[in-house]
Amino acid sequence: MITNIKNGLDVSTVVQAAVSQHGATHEDLIPILLSVNEQLGYLPTEALSEISHSLRLAHSEIMAVASFYRMLSTEPRGKHVIQFCESAPCHVMGGRQVLRALQEELNLEPGQTSADGQWTLLEISCPGICGVGPVMMIDEDVYGNLVPERLSEILAKYRE
Amino acid sequence: MQAIRSLVLVSGDAESKARGSLKVYEELQREIIKFGLQNEITVTMVEDVGRHDVLPLVIVYPEAVIYGPVTAADVPFLVEEHLYKGRIAAGLQASTKELSGRIAWLSARKGTLPAEQRIVLHRVGLIDPDSIEDYIAHDGYEALGKALNEMSPQEVIEEVISSGLKGRGGAGFPTGLKWKFVAQVDNYPKYIVCNADESEPGTFKDRVILEGDPHSMIESMAIAGYAVGADVGYIYIRGEYKLAQRRMAQAIEQARELGLLGEKIFGSNFNFDIHIHSGAGAYICGEETSLIESIEGKRGEPRSRPPYPTTHGLWDKPTVINNVETLANIPPIIHNGATWFRAFGPKSSPGTKVYTILGNVNVTGLIEVPMGITLREVVAIYARGMKNGKSLKLAQTGGSGGSIFPASLQDTPMDYDSYQRAGVSLGSGALLICNEDTCVVDLAKVLLNFFNQESCGKCTPCRVGVQRALQILTNFSEGTGQPNDIDALQKLSDNLIQLSNCGLGQTAAVPLRDMLNHFRAEVDAHVKLKVCPTGVCQMSGKHVWE
């Protein structure tokens, strides 16, 4: 029995709960991965092995799916995940300047997680909130009509 | 700030021209300049006015006053009275009786707020999306009842075919025909899939429909199921649309409780149920065969076609895949009939289209307008003109499947056929309006960067071609481009269109093709003179001639 504590949760318990919620066929793989990823913050190897056992699918097959989708991560992510939209509509509204300021503020490149584990900065494709671009999401919160000057005030809310 | 105060439309169909509308148009231009109004009033010619007894017509917005027939001799009076003094030019108004087509729709727009006649969005914002009772009180599930009790499956398909409805996801394939293909196949079970993996940059129409009118998806998928002989539907909603997923799940529960999903719906022998499948963050899954792979629990890599999903779809069974907006048209078509539907928009592309207006304009947002409206009308009427009085340089019609098209094409009617003839594509309905401060190379770079991130990597032309194109564009924007790179870009664009396995690679070529077709001088400036005319590109690279 593999047990491992991530985010204070037991990996095996989380996986089994997801499997009994969604089912144990190939079709249920992505919903299971989404649930586990949401609870643990990412998909540790132990979780993938456990899913592989439960669904009777090769570990490589699980890995192929887990590494394909952007909302699934096989690497630990920061406590807060910032998703910045750099699609064309946000870009022409000044998104590039905001992203540059954000990178300076956090000292991170898109795709990186800060050394203290606080932040992960990701570029996402359009989240569909273009009427108020440029847009970013911090965890589940959406911020629109961004200008560089507003960033430190917004980030302060998430800093301890 | 300088917004366009009025927009003047002059009918420009063959009959109007025969009756002198060109003269009226020229005279209007002259008179407007005489009164010094040329900076606040735009005059344009439109086709498809749908009325013949009062031609040539002149229509003034935003008041939507219709004059006709107007002769060149009437113009000085019209301009002085209406455009200069701001009152209706007495005696010239056309009777508004028996107006039809686009003109009828446009004339319903009085004042600044639109009295839009909506089909797809007619309940959005009007009903409580969490209440099935509210939906039913607004004609909800009546079309399903009508289909099940009064029509045979063949009649439903015939009705959809004769409505002329085309797929609103971007490709514009006739919906009724797709249903007919699936209905013809004798292989069960069959599936209905609703493609709600809306990820086109600048598009959020499907989100608004899912969040504002979730029951319309259930009703239309059930109608589709009845028509083709399917009893299971899947709705694939992108992972980021959490609210839409919650509302849809609740709507499905409510429908099951009232027996509108499940067995023997409306006392008929028809059974139907719907499952929600969440996306997990992959743009490619909007491609129909990738979406199928994803529902099956695999990587979202597109399949080779043929065979098409109509015969070999989900679990290799016959499958109808329709976009959210396409499906939202179905209940009104069944409820009101194909003839009613064909009254909106031009003959070749009937109905309305939902657009998202974005970019450097005064008002951004979502609109539903008849097919065939022009970009100029959208900018002047709905977007209230360009922001800060700047001028329109180009519009981009959606992250993929769309085009970058120059201001010179802004009078092209926005419908599938007219756009195809003009060599541009309509895409999913995003209208990103850009002013003269936009650099076309920079814009193409952003678009290619998007495709570079979202290419699934299965086929080489797309995986390598997009990466290479992005590299060349980056060089252009840094001032390190070589003249032969332009030819290379042209070749890459051709290769992407001809050799890519799916629509993603093919449409990644579109911004390249359009940029080279319409903005060659600006590209040349970047490459040959190492200058970005708009000053957007940094040009910070080490120049070869240094």
Image: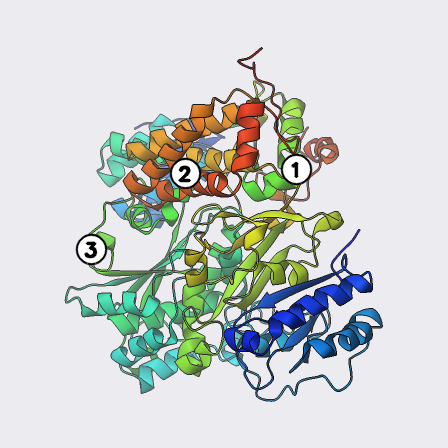
Q: CA distance from mark 3 to mark 1?
A: 45 Å
Q: Residue at x 75, y 87 (%)?
A: B91
Q: CA distance from mark 2 to mark 1?
A: 36 Å
Left or right of B417 on screen, residue B105: right
Q: Which residue is mark 3?
A: B312
Q: Determine the secondary structure under disc 3.
A: loop
Residue B435 in which image quadrant: top right
Dot 2 falls on which chain?
Answer: A
Image coords of residue A68 (percent x, y): 36, 35
Q: Residue at x 76, y 76 (%)?
A: B78
Amino acid type, label 1:
Gly
**Is residue B471 something that shows in the picture?**
no
Q: Specify few, some or many for label 3: CA neighbours under 10 Å numbering under 14, 14-19, or 20 or more.
A: some
The foreground one among B454 and A7 is B454
Q: Which residue is mark 1?
A: A94
Q: Which residue is mark 2?
A: A36
